[in-house]
Image: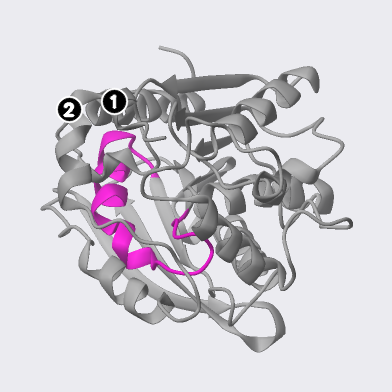
């Protein structure tokens, strides 16, 4: 049964031009190359400097990062560690540069985007440890970067949102880097979605159940949905959510991750964690591929305003 009739009319042209695909080992290289072609050019962001560095990761592995810094900055600025999406199996920090430059300017914050290693070449915990290394580097080097280390947030989309949620858990448990906010855009946080009864109205477009199984299998190194999966791999597996930073979670009503995202938001509230939850009607996974549509503009406004409130307080 097709759910095309439920798609927001503004988004329908995107489905007509965006190729439908599913990931597997045979197609992964081609899909990585195709995704690279979707990267938007970085706009002229007046007053934003962009710097690329490599920092030390776990076990001597170098981690690439891109720093977006508003200039000049007379006082230390809040900071965001950004983690790109791609189903845990594709994507680069460079692909998010256009959005990060705009956000750094609009929210007046330093953004560090991390080029974590990808599965299946690097399964869990490698990608998460790369993200943690970048977060620790950001925190420890706050003075050099002109960052206020008491105002650091994490953010990500899809698999990047899953890593951001897991990173918030890991930061809480290691106790080295305090976080003030987690911005999770349709986060990929629960491998058990692969084995649960299918929701009849989600997952038809862009990110399908078959792609989801492949992404989780690649990250975990085993079939998803089994016993003993670490909450640092799949944040929804965490039993204790108390003490996590306030969260912003957004997802489309046709997104495969709808139920896992809403459930996580509710569980966070039961743990005393403030949550702002948005469910966008008629939106599929990655609907911002059509950035000039009404729904994409509304979602961009909502997540920017939430970030600004978290970094600078209400107002």
Residue 266 image label: none
Mark-to-mark CA distance, 1 and 2: 12 Å
Please report the bounds of the magenta region as a residue range: 83-109
The residue wearing badge 1 is 5
Which of the two labelled residues, at mark 1 and mark 2, occupies the earlier sequence position? 1
At 28% from the left and 58% from the top, the residue drawn is 97
In this view, 112 is above or below 110 = below
In the foreground, 310 or 139: 310
Q: Is residue 174 something one can see in this rendering?
A: yes
* Residue 218 x/y as whole percent: 62, 71
Residue 67 falls within the magenta-colored stretch: no
- Please tell me which residue is depicted at 79% across the width and 32% down the height of the picture: 243
| Front-most of residues 94 and 124 | 124
| Image location of residue 144, percent across then percent down | 48, 61
> Does residue 100 show up magenta in the picture?
yes
Q: Position of residue 140 (x, y in %)?
A: 62, 60
Q: Which residue is mark 2?
A: 10
């Amino acid at each position: 049964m097709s759910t095309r009739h439920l798609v927001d009319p503004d988004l329908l042209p995107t489905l007509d031009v965006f190729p439908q695909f599913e990931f597997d080992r045979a197609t992964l290289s081609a899909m990585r190359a195709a995704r690279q072609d979707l990267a938007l050019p970085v706009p002229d962001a007046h007053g934003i400097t962009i710097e690329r560095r490599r920092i030390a990761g776990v076990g001597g592995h170098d981690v690439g990062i891109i720093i977006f810094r508003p200039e000049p900055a007379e006082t230390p600025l809040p900071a965001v560690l950004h983690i790109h999406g791609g189903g845990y199996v594709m994507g680069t920090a460079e692909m998010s540069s256009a959005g990060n430059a705009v956000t750094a300017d609009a929210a007046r914050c330093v953004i560090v985007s991390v080029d974590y290693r990808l599965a299946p070449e690097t399964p869990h915990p490698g990608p998460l440890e790369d993200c943690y290394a970048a977060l620790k580097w950001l925190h420890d080097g706050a003075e050099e970067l002109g960052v206020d280390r008491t105002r650091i947030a994490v953010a990500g989309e899809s698999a990047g949102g899953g890593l951001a949620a897991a990173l918030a858990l890991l930061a809480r448990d290691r106790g080295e880097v305090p976080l003030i906010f987690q911005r999770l855009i349709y986060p990929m946080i629960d491998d058990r979605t692969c084995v649960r009864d299918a929701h009849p109205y989600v997952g038809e477009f862009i990110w399908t159940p078959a792609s989801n199984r492949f992404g989780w299998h690649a990250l975990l190194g085993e079939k998803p949905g089994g016993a003993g999966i670490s909450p640092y791999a799949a944040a929804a597996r965490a039993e204790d959510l108390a003490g996590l930073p306030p969260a912003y979670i957004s997802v489309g009503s046709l997104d495969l991750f709808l139920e896992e995202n809403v459930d996580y938001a509710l569980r966070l509230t039961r743990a005393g964690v403030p949550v702002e939850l948005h469910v966008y009607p008629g939106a599929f996974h990655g609907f911002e591929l059509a950035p000039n549509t009404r729904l994409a503009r509304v979602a961009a406004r909502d997540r920017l305003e939430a970030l600004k409130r978290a970094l600078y307080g209400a107002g």
